[in-house]
Amino acid sequence: MTSIFRTAMGDAAFGRLHPELRRRFSVGLASGELCVGRGVMDRIWHGRAFVRPFLSLGATRNILLSRTGRHVPFTIENVPYADSYGREAVTFVRTFDLPGGPRRFDATMVHSPERGCVLDYLGTHQHLASDLHLSAEPGGSLLIRSGEHRFREGPLDVRVPELLGGRAEVRESFDEDTGRFRISVRVVNRRFGPLFGYEGSFTASYADVRSHGVRAGLRPVREEVRT
């Protein structure tokens, strides 16, 4: 049994990642480890003004961020657990210490054999699901690109048109000179251009998930079985 990320990438591609990235993305039930990153976002940015109401709406369910900032302290919690449907899931809960109070951006990831990728459920109620495709880049960095997005609410299950959705690109690397992970996130709409993003760096610490468990409030309020 391997992590959901190694399963999605395959052994050869996963092996090309920097050793520190391999450990971070080996977090799972098999490794028994959780990972907590702590650092600073150099910049959190938005696109044009019309984007902000949509970001504010998403922020009510911890999807994306409705505020901008510079030099913002943050944490990211990657904790594996078995969800209500028996699947291995890993939390990607980011908490940003913004002026006016902390803001969260929640995601939970599972591997989808049917879709052949990692499935990213966004927000507290997993209303949005995105296909994620992972690849190793030169120098051992990790590139994550989003694919199709779907919206689920009750019986509703619809594909989000590209005109309305955004394509996410996440780059994560390890800087050996500073001993820090570097991350850059950029979400772009095909017609309207850049929507949202952030970049910064962090250090990571690991712990035994069997001893620590999943802290209260980290799992989503509602879990979605549809892939």
Image: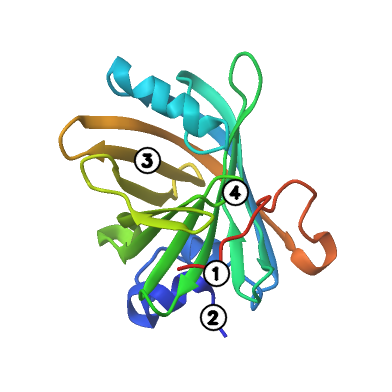
Q: In which quarter of the image is residue 225?
A: bottom right
| Neighbour tally class for label 1: few under 14, some 14-19, many 20 plus, Cα within 10 Å | many
**What residue does disc 4 label?**
125
Between residue 166 and residue 211, name the one nearer to us: 166
**What residue does disc 3 label?**
184
**What residue does disc 2 label?**
2
- Give, as a three-letter code, the residue at label 3: Ser
Between residue 64 and residue 38, name the one nearer to us: 64
Q: Quadrant of residue 88?
A: bottom right
| Neighbour tally class for label 4: few under 14, some 14-19, many 20 plus, Cα within 10 Å | many
Q: Which of marks 3 and 2 is nearer the N terminus?
A: 2
| Neighbour tally class for label 3: few under 14, some 14-19, many 20 plus, Cα within 10 Å | some
Q: Mark 1 to mark 3: distance in Å?
A: 20 Å
- Give, as a three-letter code, the residue at label 1: Ser
Dot 4 falls on a residue whose secondary structure is loop
**What residue does disc 1 label?**
26
Q: Mark 3 to mark 2: distance in Å?
A: 26 Å
- Give, as a three-letter code, the residue at label 4: His
- The percent coordinates of residue 140 (x first, y second) are 34, 61
Dot 3 falls on a residue whose secondary structure is strand
Query: Does the CB distance between marks 3 and 2 fall below 8 Å?
Result: no
